Amino acid sequence: MIRRQYACARWAGLVCACVSAGALAQTAPPPDAQASDPARLGWMVGSPPPADKIVRKEDGSFYRFPQLRWTFSNARQLGATTNVSRGLDSPSALPRAERADLAAVTLVPLGMTEPMTWGQAFDANYTDGVVVLHKGRIVYERYAGVFKPDGQHLAQSLTKSFFGTIAAMLVADGQIDQNALVTQYVPELKGSAFADATVRQVMDMRTGLKYSENYADPKAEIWMHARAGNVLPRPPGYQGPQSFYEFLQMVQKEGEHGGAFAYKTVNSDVLGWVIRRVTGKSAGQVLSERIWSRLGMEQDAYFTVDSVGTEFAGGGLNTGLRDLARFGELMRRGGRWGGPFDGRQVIPQAVVDDIRRGGDRAAFTPAGYVTLPGWSYRNMWWVTHNEHGAYMARGIHGQAIYVDPTAEMVTARYASHPLAANANNDPTSLPAYHALARQLMGATR
């Protein structure tokens, strides 16, 4: 049985699901990918849409299933956002070399005996879009629902891996001392749980915090965090913290820092604050300057923000799918970008190598992720330690960047699975990525 800690582990966005605890609970199996297709159901179509087809943030419908399948591709319509510029250069090329054989690649889901195909897994995971790169070429690309190649999708906690990488870049540049206390950069946190936490402990989520992500508990700290950041609608008469930063100053300590890994989104928001304080720029500006404008992205990205314009560093990024794949390809290439940007070392090789090596596996084990045995966590990336040395960015409801250095493969996926925790799609997803990698390797030996 999957431990509650894992079932509630991935926060960015799930808090939106429930104006009351348990709003995602299913009394019957949810409709499948075809029956829940947002284009087929006609959400938000019409001038105005029919009353029963309107999706709103205020009433919580934006995060109920199946409405959330529309929401994830249209977050900008539901709240305040800020832009992440791609710059003015022409888009970098992603050559195409589609492979007709990939849809039929077979895999056996974890804990099962019956195989399924890669194409069947697309629907089983409620996939909105997937791009697979092999040696920098698109070998598979497919979209569903209302998500299109020129659209943008909510990245959820993939956002964390961008900022874990940027923080590591700033460490490599000497702008951040990873062993310094967080309060060296953000003294406003001296009265909080982060007063004696180091930047490195925050980057690897090894902080001891009184912060529950148990969605069945209406008193869990996650609910206040969500309302403070304007992720959830605030109830009438709300008197709580008015922004992410106000909430972070209220988090209290529980246990010691530097112990076991414990996934808590507040760490990402603290890291975003450190980055903003060190650079003097917003998180979106830093992302643009450090990564987004340096790869020849096709589209601007955007962030959801709180009431004072602070980007949600824990899960508010929205991007195009091919641009997500470009970021994964940058990581696969050791931080060096190609095409018209040949020779551009965007991310220091040492930063990528550090991520690939992973974190403390013994510290990861107590978290109880039954679908991730032997994994670790480093710089807000999830590291498999499998025979291919694969590592991932992961977000609730099935968002993923899967980098397989041995197979020279990158898979970028956006999805809208009805259940938030990745334990619900890992049994299908993880074997699918590995099966695809083996197929691509076999064709080039």
Image (cartoon, rainbow, N blue to C red):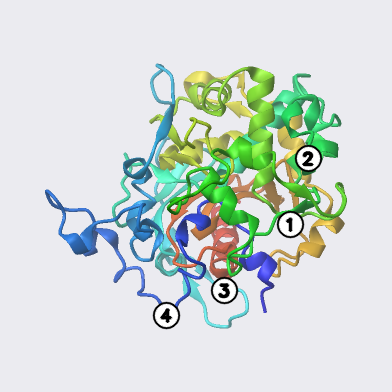
Circle on res. 109: 3
Q: Are marks 2 and 4 in contact (CB under 8 Å)?
A: no
Say which label, 3 or 2, has the lower sequence index. 3
Q: Amino acid at mark 3?
A: Pro
Residue underneath mark 1: 387
Of badges 3 and 2, the one in the foreground is 2
Against 359, residue 94 (above or below) is: above
Residue 274 in percent (x, y) is at 69, 29
Q: Secondary structure at mark 4?
A: loop
Residue 2 in percent (x, y) is at 66, 74
Of badges 3 and 4, the one in the foreground is 4
Q: Residues within 10 Å of mark 1 (few under 14, many from 20)?
A: few
Q: Are marks 2 and 1 in contact (CB under 8 Å)?
A: no
Nearest the eye: 333 or 204: 204
Q: Residues within 10 Å of mark 3 (few under 14, many from 20)?
A: some
Of badges 2 and 4, the one in the foreground is 2
Of badges 1 and 3, the one in the foreground is 3
Between the C-alphas of marks 3 and 2, the distance is 40 Å
Residue underneath mark 2: 194
Between the C-alphas of marks 1 and 3, the distance is 18 Å
Between the C-alphas of marks 2 and 4, the distance is 41 Å
Q: Are marks 1 and 3 in contact (CB under 8 Å)?
A: no
Residue 180 in percent (x, y) is at 85, 29
Residue at 35% across, 58% down: 59
Residue at 49% across, 49% down: 238
Q: Residues within 10 Å of mark 4 (few under 14, many from 20)?
A: few
Residue at 58% across, 39% down: 244
> Which image quadrant: the N terminus?
bottom right
Whether residue 67 can be seen here: yes
Circle on res. 29: 4
Q: Amino acid at mark 2?
A: Phe
